[in-house]
Image (cartoon, rainbow, N blue to C red):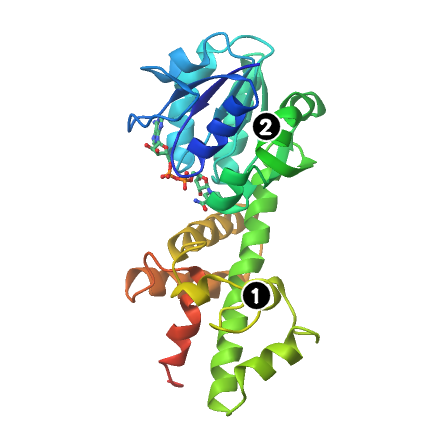
Amino acid sequence: MQIGFIGLGNMGAPMAANLAKAGHQVLGFDTAGVTVEGVTHVETASDAVAGADAVITMLPNGAILRAVADQVIPAMSKEAVLIDCSTVDVDSARAVADQAMGAGLLSVDAPVSGGIGGAAAGTLTFMAGGSEAAFAKAAPLFEIMGQKAVHCGEAGAGQAAKICNNMILGVTMIATCEAFALADKLGLDRQKMFDVVSTSSGYSWTMNAYCPAPGVGPQSPADNDYTPGFAAELMLKDLRLSQQAADSADADTPMGQVATSLYEQFVENEDGLGRDFSAMLPRFEKRGRE
Ligand code: NAD
């Protein structure tokens, strides 16, 4: 396939490199002028998409996605598929899908989980929203860049799945960290806490697979001085998107709301910026009941 790839940042660069390695012809564009091995670099977004069978975007937010879509949709070939892998708000995902449909294109919103490591290793999980035909056309590319792709429903369903998952993740990480901090104050050994909770009804991915306590459980960013991993500011971005979606859908999400304000506080007023999102544990350790 000929693929246009727009947004060659931390995630986009290794994803584009994997597509090129698999034998696809990849034309890449990034406003920062990044170069990626195996990818042909072009001067504009329109140059990247002309004649392409598939166009992939991996951009910071919904406003940038909408601006890029305005540029590339008119330049794309009919029957080509637009695959947005960025994490953006559901409304932007749906607006871009409508615009693509109006132009006779297929489109999928396909945010990912798996982070930079998953992008490099080609083991991302894709959560996709769009028609059957659009998903079928994108699926072979998901197979190269990832290990799993779930077709979640119509346009916007991929973004909806992503932010609901990450709202659970943010809430659960906070619950796990505050429970460890309480256990400390009750004199409970952290290893014993892990041994019990990881095999009891309090278990979760944050406890069992990504334990926020250093030296306990499997290797995690906690064992590397909370170097991300998944940075607290990215968690905050996804939590904010979840609350934006909850506002527009009139959904009551009190835990998501609290998690958003705690990560906001942590990133903007404390030392959370640039640290892994599990660094909530040392944050709680330092605090008492107010
Ligand atoms: P990044 O900031 O490293 O990359 C974004 C790239 O887009 C940059 O290189 C930037 O120069 C480029 N860009 C910005 N505006 C542009 C434009 N108008 N045209 C062309 N290029 C433009 O971000 P990232 O970490 O690669 O994340 C990309 C997306 O993936 C985000 O939506 C993020 O939320 C999501 N995501 C990131 C991770 C992660 O661990 N980093 C995990 C899952 C999802």
Tell which residue pokes out farthest to the bottom in this image.
Answer: 187
In this rendered view, identify the residue nearer to me: 136 or 212. 212
**What is the crowding at mark 1: few (fewer than 14 residues within 10 Å), some, or many (at least 20)?**
some
- Could you tell me how far apart the alpha carbons at marks 2 and 1 are, in whole angstroms? 35 Å
Q: Quadrant of residue 49?
A: top left
Disc 2: which residue: 108
The residue drawn where x is 38% and y is 54% is 233
Q: Is residue 165 above or below residue 31?
A: below
The residue drawn where x is 60% and y is 77% is 194
First in residue order: circle 2 vs circle 1 = 2
* Of marks 2 and 1, the one in the foreground: 1
The residue drawn where x is 32% and y is 58% is 273
Q: In which quarter of the image is residue 201?
A: bottom right
- The answer, for residue 170, to whether it is visible in the render is yes
Task: Give the x, y percent position of residue 268.
Answer: 30, 60
Disc 1: which residue: 218
Task: Give the x, y percent position of residue 260.
Answer: 44, 60
Location of the N terminus (image quadrant): top right
Residue type indicated by callout 1: Pro
